[in-house]
Image (spheres, rainbow, N blue to C red):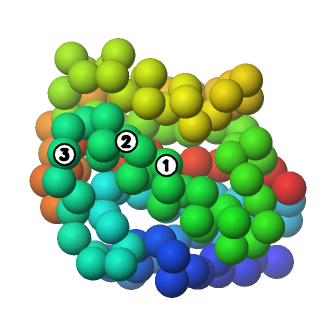
């Protein structure tokens, strides 16, 4: 059984997709970009600020169904500039503490709304 996940505390979907889908014991979150859910605008700041906003958005969606970052089993990070990998990695690590989900990081030529980072996750209940 599939269940759509939705919260007002994270950016609303800007196309024909959901913030996330629960499928059995797995949660699949759509890629999150550095949008402030209160203003629906891309946040100002460097890649660290953008990474932190993305992580807050992910946390908000997970929290809406009673989960935390510790439930994440896999992340995929999409970056416009792999030269920023070290900064992203440091910001990302602060959110996870000792938890270490599997991860892929890919440099891409363009992302929605021309942002510099997008992160999607898979979590398990």
| Direction from residue 23 to residue 110 in the image, left or right | left
Q: Which residue is mark 1?
A: 55
Mark 3 or mark 1, which is nearer to you?
Answer: 3
Question: Which of the two residues, 4 or 63, is positioned nearer the viewer here?
Answer: 63
Residue ID at (38%, 74%): 37
| Direction from residue 88 to residue 4 in the image, left or right | right
Residue 62 visible at all = yes
| Direction from residue 77 to residue 81 in the image, left or right | left
Picture quadrant where residue 90 is located:
top left
Q: Which residue is mark 3?
A: 45
Residue ID at (49%, 38%): 76
Q: Position of residue 44 (x, y in %)?
A: 17, 53
Disc nearer the start of the sequence (2/3): 3
Which SS class for mark 3?
Answer: loop
Quadrant holding the N terminus: bottom right
Residue 108 visible at all = no
| Direction from residue 58 to residue 88 in the image, left or right | left
Question: Which of the two residues, 45 or 92, is positioned nearer the viewer here?
Answer: 45
Spatial separation of the CA atoms under disc 2 and disc 3: 10 Å
Picture quadrant where residue 24 is located:
bottom right
Question: Which of the two residues, 7 or 76, is positioned nearer the viewer here?
Answer: 7
Q: Position of residue 110 (x, y in %)?
A: 16, 45
Which SS class for mark 2?
Answer: helix
Quadrant holding the C terminus: bottom right
Q: Position of residue 123 (x, y in %)?
A: 72, 50
Disc nearer the start of the sequence (3/1): 3
Which SS class for mark 1?
Answer: helix
Res. 51 mark: 2
Q: Is residue 77 above or below residue 5?
A: above
Tag 2 near tag 1, CB within 8 Å: yes
Q: Is residue 65 above or below residue 50?
A: below
């Amino acid at each position: 059984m599939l269940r759509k996940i939705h919260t007002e505390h994270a950016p609303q979907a800007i196309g024909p997709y959901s913030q996330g889908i629960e499928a059995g014991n797995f949660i699949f979150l759509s890629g999150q970009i550095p949008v402030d859910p209160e203003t629906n605008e891309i946040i100002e700041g460097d890649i660290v600020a953008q990474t932190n906003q993305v992580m807050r958005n992910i946390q908000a969606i997970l929290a809406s169904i009673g989960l935390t970052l510790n439930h994440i089993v896999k992340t995929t990070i999409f970056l416009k500039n792999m030269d920023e990998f070290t900064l992203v990695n440091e910001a990302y690590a602060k959110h996870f503490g000792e938890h270490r989900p599997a991860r892929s990081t890919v440099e891409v030529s363009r992302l929605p709304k021309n942002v510099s980072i997008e992160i999607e996750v898979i979590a398990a209940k």
